[in-house]
Every structure is written in structure tokens, then in C-alpha cells.
Amino acid sequence: MADTKANSGKLLDIRNLRIEATVYPPGEAPKTITLVHDVSLTLEKGKVLGLIGESGAGKSTIGLSSMAYGRGGVRITGGEVILNGRDILKAGPKGVRALRGREVCYVAQSAAAAFNPAHKLIDQVVEAAMLHGTATRAEAEKRAVTLFKKLSLPNPETIGERYPHQVSGGQLQRVMTAMALCSEPDLIVFDEPTTALDVTTQIDVLAAIKDAIRDTHVAALYITHDLAVVAQVSDEIMVLRHGRLVEWGGTRQIIKEPRQEYTNALVSVHEIEHKEQQPGTTPFLSVKNVTAAYGGGHVKVLKNVSVDIYPGQTLAVVGESGSGKSTLARAITGLLPPEEGTVTFDGRPLANRLADRPKEDLRQLQMIYQMADVAMNPRQTVGTIIGRPLEFYFGMKGRERDKRVAELLDEIEMGKGFVDRYPAELSGGQKQRVCIARSLAAKPKLIICDEVTSALDPLVANGILKLLLNLQQVEKVAYLFITHDLATVKSIADSIAVMYRGEVVRYGPKSKVLTPPFDAYTDLLLSSVPEMEIGWLEKAIKGRRMESAGN
Amino acid sequence: MSYPILRLVAQRILLGIVLLFAVSVLIFAGTQILPGDVAQAILGQSATPEALANLREQLGLNDPAWLRYVHWLWGILHGDFGTAQSSGLDIATSISTRLKNTLFLAACAAIVAVPLAIILGLIAVRYRNGFVDKLISGLALASTSFPEFFIGYVLIFVFAVHWQIFPSISTVDDSTPFLERLQAVVLPATALTLVVLAHMMRMTRAAILNVMQSAYIETAELKGLKPFDIIRKHAFPNAIAPVVNVVMLNLAYLIVGVVVVEVIFVYPGMGQYLVDHVAKRDVPVVQAVGLIFAAVYITLNIVADIAAIVANPRLRHPK
């Protein structure tokens, strides 16, 4: 209508898209910032375009513009979004409602949050198809069951009768894909659909999505920050940064011959060389036969776990969610007193309960968490946050404390100008650095790092890992590094404990743990880590020896 | 363990019963602490010591307090609230007509007020921060801010004196036919509706706005649902628990807190009955009414709790 030049092969044609938002910085006048700067893209019918970049790159914002939707006060202020030959930005509220859920459907990052907890899955899956009159209730339900089957969900006939909380995260993500496919749209926007899942579950969901796309000939915008994932499903990849186009090309070209420096950095992000240290003669912290449970002994989450940590070295604990990794940390710190077994520190047993431990023991074990922003008091400045352990453990005050805070800030490469800032004024990576400085301030022997890089963009996470390794050299601190990401483990660990359903299934020096022959679970974990290689997904699925626990 | 919901509901009901017993102890103890002697109050200042002693014996006032409590409670459990000292009438009979009247008035007010408040709340969310929202909130808050006697007299002035559509005095008795009864309570019910409306409306609005932040609201929006359908189908079911809570509190108010409105419209309900007998220092009546009011409060709050439990799909459909 608005544009008659659109040829028949083109489904989506975004031209010079400009997206803005108004921000309200504290104590300043509101100002308009531009999130997306004149980005253009085209997508042909049945093709998959991957949008990749770190957070703030504008990937989701661009993806949602294909539904004429701006999340949280975001405004599309310039350009055209031509879908099926018409500019949908001029369609008006009614016209936009007619295309949402009909021509374009959306698959969110967290299906657990995106499903309404009050309604059955089937009611939500068929809702859009019925609303737009593309099917009767019976037809839509039949279609849904077919899709459940195609996405290899268990009990496809009856799973729709369940409520969202009765289904696992990986299954829910597949149900959401079925929901998007149910109204037979021309385009689906996948917004980080596997990011919140375990690696072992991610591979299943990824394969299911890929098959569904192939069989239904639907076009897709696949948004992710993980280049290895997008390489498995996309025909083309578009790299974005700070709302601008960096590079756009075929999948093979982007991952094999990136033309831009930034793309190259993304491609080679995980490669940190870390030489494994030999375990010393005596560990300073030993966990011996620890069993721990929640609910007064009803739910055993740790079963007979034994690991050792050597001075100045890193023990990585890997496993999928629910395997008991974080519970191990809670048992060591005394937050969850073990039912059986002991934790010895420097040759003497530690009190089971946190409340029974002397201050000195508390000082020796520090923690860093996944969510740096909720681990800091938003009303305290960086200086106060880092200075607190100095006062608490060493009684430092005034100039002496400020001097030490400045030294610590130097160590985390945040030299000048950060002391008086509040957490809200820092980026995600900077927040995590402040948390690291806070734990170092106590001069501990061990820092427990619980998924400290999981919430960060790959390049930022990489910086944090390098910082942790440098600090280990300088401060001789040991790490207990909890993660589900095997690439991270390779970069940082000296020894590795693989956990599965509350038990350590494989334990030893890194080189041994990562050398075949593998047990079935370690094999599954290792083979599930996406590799930046076209066709990896099919190979990995074929070579599997066991199903993931999330299935 | 397979039906956690039944266990939770049973727990609430048992707790309610325990609470009611505790309240009965408090009410009984409270009236015992009050100064004055019942026998003296009945016989007056000029009574002879012998007559007082006889009456005390007759009323069982010489028994220890716990025994009198047990007798009192035992009577109540059998529907015997005792007799009113001031009139000598059976309390249970007097209360039953009064309670019926009060419940009738409360029901009339609730049938209008609750749906109206919720619908206004939904509309306010649909046009949030716009003109309609501000108009609804402004009017509702204004009607709540006026004292109920003021609203009552304005209603009487407009509808009973000026236009003469409804009676200004809402006297009813057992023989009043239903329609006449209904006509009699129109003005007091309207006054009550205006008093409780804003509280429920604002709470509905706040509870739904809270839910509107959820990711599943975005999902609904991206399916192409109309804004009002999103609120009705996807937001409201998840806001039921807080809404039911505030509705029940207001229903309780409609039953136990309507003294002023009853007095203005001369409506023979529980509130008036209580006030009359407080003035006459008629302790058995005050005890009985206090206990009934407590029971109403506790019952309605149990209903709210149970509704919140049942509205939660995680409890209704365990894994």
C-alpha cells in the first residue's frame, strides 16, 4: 500500500529505523536518547536472520519493531517497517492489533514469566489463533497438539491441560514456540529463547526450534548474544552494537571471516589461556562427605559430597540448575548447616552453623553473587560498600580506610572517579567489579563465586574472568567457582567437580576431568556447549548418550 | 499431602474457630472488669442488702468468673444469649430480626458497591493516568471523604424532601413486604455504597496495575488483544487475592460499622440495637452483639483467605 516496490519475496523490510526513549536521570532534566540509529534490514520469506550483540545493542528493540511495539516507553521515531508490503508504523492501533499474533508472533526469553500463571497452557496457546479467526477452537487445539509433538514435548495430548508452573523451563520454552506457531504467522521474533536455560536443555530447545522453523517455512528474527547459538539456526547474521549496524552477512562469512574488529572479538571471546596449577600437598579447605537437605531433611540436595581446595587455586563446580552447586556453597559458608559430614579449614573443623563461627572464620570465606546489583545497597556509594568490610574486620577508619579503598579500586581497574558513585550509576560489569573489591577487602583465603559472569555480556564476562585470574596471582586467593558454563570453566579452573543431582560425578585436575573417557553426564555437558561451527547442532544431537535432566 | 489446598483451608477454618473462642474470652473478661454491679443496676440504689444478695444468688453472680464464662458460652452454643436486663426480653429473638435487617441492608449495598467498584477499577486501569482515571478516582475519593452522616442528610434532602421519591425514615418490621423493604433501604444503601466504593476501587486499580508490569501482559499485548481484554482476561485473575481481601474488609464494615447510617435513617439494625443497650449499660446484650460482630469479621476474613488460596493456581493445581 504505502510501498508498492516491495517484491514478492520480501517479507520484512526495515528502512532507516530510528528508535528513541526518554530517560529520567536523577537530579537532571529528562532527556531523549537514541537507542537505534538508522538501521535497515530485509528478510525474505522462510529465512532466518540472527540479530546479535551485547545488551544495549538494540537487538530486542529492533525485533519488536517488526510488531510495531516499543517496550517500556520506547518510541519508534523514524524510518519504515514494511511487512507484507505495507508500512505497519502507519497502521494505527487497530491495524497493529490485527497483525500482532497473526502475521508476526513473539517468543520471549523467559517463558516462565511470559505465560499467565492463572490460565491453562492450551488456552494461552490457541488464544491468538482464535482471536484472529484463523481457526476454530477445535482446529486450533488440534494444531497445538501437532506442534507439541513436533517440538517433542512429553504427553502432547495432555500437556496443554497443565498450568505453567507444572511444566519445566525447557518445556515451557517449547510450548511458547508452539504458541507462536499456532496462528501460522509469516514471521516469528525469537528473543533470546534459550539464554535462560541450562546448556543441556538449550540444545534440545534449539533443535526443536530449528526443526519447527524448517517444517513450517516460517521466517524468523533470532535475537541472542551467543554467536555460537545463532550460527546453528540462522541463514544470515547481523551484528549490532550501541544501536548501530556493525556487520551483516551470511552465517558462514560472519563466523569464519568476520570483516569488522568487533565481530572478530565476539567470535574469539572465550579463548583465555589458563595454565593449570598442580594441586599442592595439603588443601586448606576440605569438604568431607557432606550431606545437606532443605525442608527439615525432606529434600536431599547434597549427597555425600567431598572436595578439596588448595591455596591460591580455583576449583570449578559445574552442573545444570538443581544439581546442588549453590547448595554446596551454602553448606561451606554455614548458611545451610550440613546434616552430615564436615568442612575443615586450616586443619580444624568449621562450625556447621554460620551463627557459631567466629568473625575470623567469616572473614576468610567471602562470596560474590550472580546478581551484582541486588548484592549491593543501592543507597550506599562504592566507597562505603568497599569500606564496610575494612571497618568490620580490621577496624580501619578515616584516611587509612580511604587509602585502602583507593588501592582496591585500582586493583579492579576502576581507578579514579568511582568512589562517590552509587551502584545505579555503574554498568553491569563495573557492579560485579565492585563486588569483587568488596570481597577482596576482607583479605580472605577463599572467595566463592556463584555464577558471577552468567548475567554479563560475553566480552564483559571475559574481562571479569581475566581480572579474577590476575587478582589470584597478586592476592594468592583461592576460588570456588560455581558455573553452568563449561567455556568459563576451561578458562579459569585448576580442578573441576562435575555435579549431577546432588552428587559429585567426576572430580579431579582440569586436564584429567576434560580428557576422555568421559562418564555419560560429563559427556552430555561437554557436548552440549555450542560450538561456533555450522552443523554442530545436528552432530551433537546425534552423538548424545543420555537425555538431559531437564527433559 | 496430595491435597495441600484442603489442608490449608481446614487450617484457616480451625484457626478462625480458635480465634473466635479467644475473642469470646476477651469480651467476657472485658465486661467483667467494668465497674458496677449487675444486681445493683437492676434493683436501683434503694434496694435492700437482702434483695441484692438474693438476686446475686439467682443470677449466679457469686460463682467464680470461669464458671460464669462456661455457662455463658454453653448457652450461646445452644442459641441462648440470655435475657436483656433493661427490657427482660430474650436477646436471641431480638437479635435475629435485627441481624436479618442489618444483613439485608449490607447485602443491598454490597450487591451494588462491589461490582461497581471492581468495574470502575478496571476502567481506571484501562485509561490509567488519563482523564477518565482521574475523574473516577476523584469522585470516589470525594464520596469517601465526606462523613457518612453528611452524605445521609444530603440524600434525605434531595430524594426524600425535595423530590420525595424515597422515604426519609427506613423503619421496617417483620410484616413489611419485600418491595417496600427494598424501597426503604435505597437511601441508606446508597449512602453506604458511596462510603465503601473508593476503598475497593482504589485497591482493585492498584492490584491490577501491579500485575500489568508482568511479562505475560506483554505476551497478551503481542497477541493483538484489545487493552480492556488484556486487563479482564490476563491481569484481573492474577489480582483477585488482594481485591477479595479488601472487599471482605468492606463487607465486614457494612455489617458492623453502620451505626451512624442506621441512626440517621432510623433503621432497626444491629448497630442501633448495640448503641441503645450500651447507653442502658445492658451487659448481656453488649456481649452478645460484640460476639456476633467478631464472628462476622472472622468469618469474612476466613472467606478472603480461602478465596486467595483457591485463586492461586499453584495451590489449586500442585505439581
Image (tube, rainbow, N blue to C red):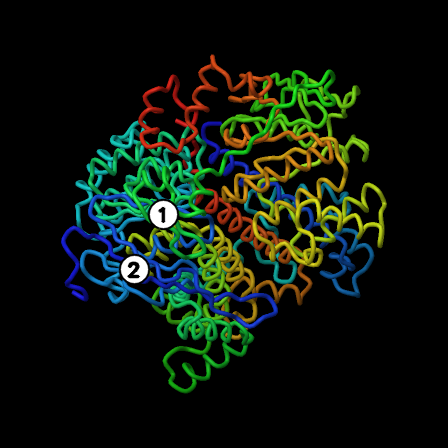
Task: Please tell me whether residue B7 is drawn above or below residue A343 in the rendered image.
Answer: below
The location of residue A52, given as percent across then percent down, is 39, 46
How far apart are labels 2 and 1 at the CA level?
Answer: 30 Å
Q: Quadrant of the C terminus of chain A?
A: top left
Chain of the residue where label 1 is placed in the rendered structure: A
Q: B101 and B148: which one is in front?
A: B148
Residue A242 rendering spot, x and y as whole percentages? 45, 56
Foreground of the two, B229 or B199: B229
- Asked where in the image residue A83 lies, by quadrant, the reply is bottom left
- Tag 2 and tag 1, C-beta contact below 8 Å: no
Residue wearing tag 2: B226
Give the residue at x 35% y 50%: B219
Residue B176: give x, y in percent of width and height: 39, 66
CA neighbours of label 1 inside 10 A, class few (<14), some (14 to 19), many (20+):
many
Give the label on residue A51, or none: 1
- Residue B290 falls left or right of residue A122: right
Q: Secondary structure at mark 2?
A: loop
Crowding near the residue tagged with mark 2, few <14, some 14–19, many ≥20 C-alpha atoms within 10 Å: some
Q: Amino acid at mark 1?
A: Leu
Q: Position of residue A457 (x, y in %)?
A: 50, 44
- Foreground of the two, B139 or B189: B139
* Residue type, mark 2 in image: Lys
The mark found on residue A220 in the picture is none
Position of residue A15 in the picture relative to residue B303 (left or right): left
Q: Are marks 2 and 1 on the same chain?
A: no
Q: Residue at x 40, y 44 (%)?
A: A224
**The furthest residue to the bottom:** B162
Q: Which image quarter is the N terminus of chain A in?
A: bottom left
